[in-house]
């Protein structure tokens, strides 16, 4: 892993979010935001060290939520605890329902014909988990949280992967205590989860 001063991550100007329509928390309107956010003219790479401290830019982060629903049973979500070796120190030891990470400049080089964002999404999935089940997936929303230090410099793009079996397993050693858990239990323990997980679960699964 590159040091933050050498790693280059994909960002968009925060001003673009205001042009498209500012929101705090979760937004379901993916068709309104995603095409413009991913236009090459609106994207740039900058050092992660700078991006982590400059709220004039938002780092684009794919955030994948895995679900599993057995016949005639409640919904389950994949969840885990972040280890201390993961890149974002401010999230260490927090529980999470989201898998994903930064899009790096290297994602431009691995597949010249692919959009770096989508190549980065594919890479993050491949690096972090093994998916040993068929699934259906779609983009379900965006997260913007300017009420936290981490959130002010990140913009989450949320995907839901509906799995036929509860067969998602960590590749990274820093994804700990992982597995599918009943939604009811996650809702009861939601205060133990990172802010993005709380925002996503409430918006997508709580019915509130």
Image: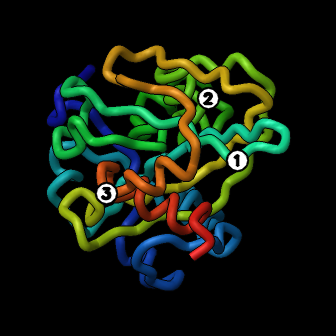
Residue 132 occupies quadrant:
top right
Q: Position of residue 83 (x, y in %)?
A: 25, 27
Residue nearest the observer in this picture, 45 or 175: 175
Taking the spot 66% from the left edge, 59% from the top edge, the residue there is: 140
Q: Position of residue 21 (x, y in %)?
A: 51, 85
Q: Earlier in the sequence, mark 2 or mark 1?
A: 1
Which quadrant of the figure contains the C terminus? bottom right
Taking the spot 53% from the left edge, 81% from the top edge, the residue there is: 20
Q: Callout 3: few (<14), some (14-19), or many (20+) C-alpha neighbours within 10 Å?
A: few
Residue nearest the observer in this picture, 208 or 20: 208
Placement of 47 over or under 3, stated as above or below = below
Which residue is labeled 2 in the image? Answer: 112
Q: Position of residue 158 (x, y in %)?
A: 56, 54
Q: Callout 2: few (<14), some (14-19), or many (20+) C-alpha neighbours within 10 Å?
A: few
CB under 8 Å between discs 3 and 1: no
Which quadrant of the figure contains the N terminus? top left
Describe the element under mark 1 as helix, strand or loop: loop
Q: Earlier in the sequence, mark 3 or mark 1?
A: 1
Q: Earlier in the sequence, mark 2 or mark 3?
A: 2
207 displayed left or right of 86: right
Gap in Å between the C-alphas at discs 2 and 1?
42 Å
Gap in Å between the C-alphas at discs 2 and 3?
42 Å
Taking the spot 15% from the left edge, 57% from the top edge, the residue there is: 53
The chosen color scheme is: rainbow
Describe the element under mark 3 as helix, strand or loop: helix
Describe the element under mark 2 as helix, strand or loop: loop
Which residue is labeled 1 in the image? Answer: 74
Q: Position of residue 138 (x, y in %)?
A: 73, 50
Q: How many marks?
A: 3
């Amino acid at each position: 892993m590159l040091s933050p001063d050498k790693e280059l991550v994909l960002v968009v100007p925060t001003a673009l979010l205001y042009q498209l329509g500012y929101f705090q928390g979760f937004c379901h309107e993916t068709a309104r935001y995603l095409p413009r956010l991913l236009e090459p003219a609106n994207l740039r790479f900058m050092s992660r060290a700078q991006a982590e401290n400059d709220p004039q830019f938002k780092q684009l982060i794919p955030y994948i939520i895995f679900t599993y629903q057995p016949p005639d049973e409640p919904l389950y979500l994949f969840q885990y605890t972040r280890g201390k070796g993961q890149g974002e120190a401010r999230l260490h030891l927090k529980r999470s329902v989201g898998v994903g990470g930064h899009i790096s400049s290297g994602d431009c080089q691995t597949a010249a014909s692919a959009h770096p964002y989508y190549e980065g999404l594919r890479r993050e999935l491949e690096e972090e988990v093994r998916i040993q089940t068929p699934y259906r997936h779609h983009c379900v929303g965006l997260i913007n949280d300017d009420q936290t230090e981490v959130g002010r410099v990140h913009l989450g793009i949320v995907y839901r992967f509906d799995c036929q079996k509860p067969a998602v397993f960590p590749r990274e050693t820093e994804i700990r205590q992982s597995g599918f858990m009943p939604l009811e239990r996650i809702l009861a323990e939601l205060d133990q989860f990172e802010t993005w997980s709380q925002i996503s679960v409430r918006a997508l699964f709580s019915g509130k």
